[in-house]
Image (cartoon, grey):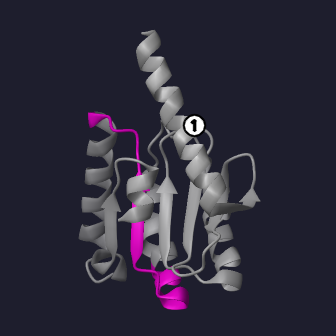
Amino acid sequence: MQNMETLINNDKLKEQALMDANFTLEYQDRWGQIYVSKKRNPTIFICKILTPYVLEEDFKKLIMQNAIVAQKTGCDKFIFDKRLLKTFHQPSMEWYYVHWKPLMYKEFQLKKHRKLFIMEEWWLKCIEVGRNEIYRKYPTNICHSLDIKVSKDMEDAINN
């Protein structure tokens, strides 16, 4: 058990060093943080959820902060770190896909989205079912043609 905890702590320290070296914290509230890459070509945003559950209105406020910050810097890639979330909320996911992603595409030509999730079967199944429902209800939405991928860790999300 000690070895597993050491590996996890080492991974967290490595990720924090990567963040500190390459990103600036631009916004924080009790629900999340928004980081922007120090290099501006490309400009990468990272939105980290800090709690196991976020109320829908607070989720929307946090996500909209990305658009506000992007007005100053632009945004070429968005990384959404939801590894701490433990509750799936379909209406929030639908709003995020159907309204926010098209807004970011229209305003900033944001096409690249990377996701970090807890890699548990039940969570991934919720995501799959939620996406299928969005595709069914909104078949012509631009969100279906964006470059959206799940990443294994922060380094992978930044580099791919």
Q: Measuring 35% from the left and 65% from the top, which residue is drawn there?
A: 160
The spot of residue 112 in percent (x, y) is: 40, 74
The answer to whether 19 is drawn above or below residue 39 in the figure is above
Q: Quadrant of residue 131?
A: bottom left
Q: Does 133 sit left or right of 80 as displayed? A: left
Quarter of the picture holding the N terminus = top left
Is residue 118 on the magenta stretch?
Answer: yes
Q: How many marks?
A: 1
Name the residue carrying label 1: 13
Q: Does 17 sit left or right of 26 as displayed? A: left
In this rendered view, identify the residue nearer to me: 1 or 136: 1
Q: How crowded is mark 1: few (under 14 residues within 10 Å), some or many (20 or more)?
A: few
Q: Quadrant of residue 98?
A: bottom left
Q: Measuring 38% from the left and 55% from the top, which residue is drawn there?
A: 156
Mark 1 secondary-structure assignment = helix
The spot of residue 153 in percent (x, y) is: 40, 47
Can residue 157 be seen here?
yes
Taking the view exactly as shown, the residue that stands out farthest to the top is 1
The answer to whether 2 is drawn above or below residue 99 in the figure is above
The answer to whether 42 is drawn above or below residue 149 in the figure is below
Give the magenta-colored segment's residue range.
102-121
Q: Measuring 53% from the left and 28% from the top, which residue is drawn there?
A: 9
Q: What residue type is labelled 1?
A: Leu
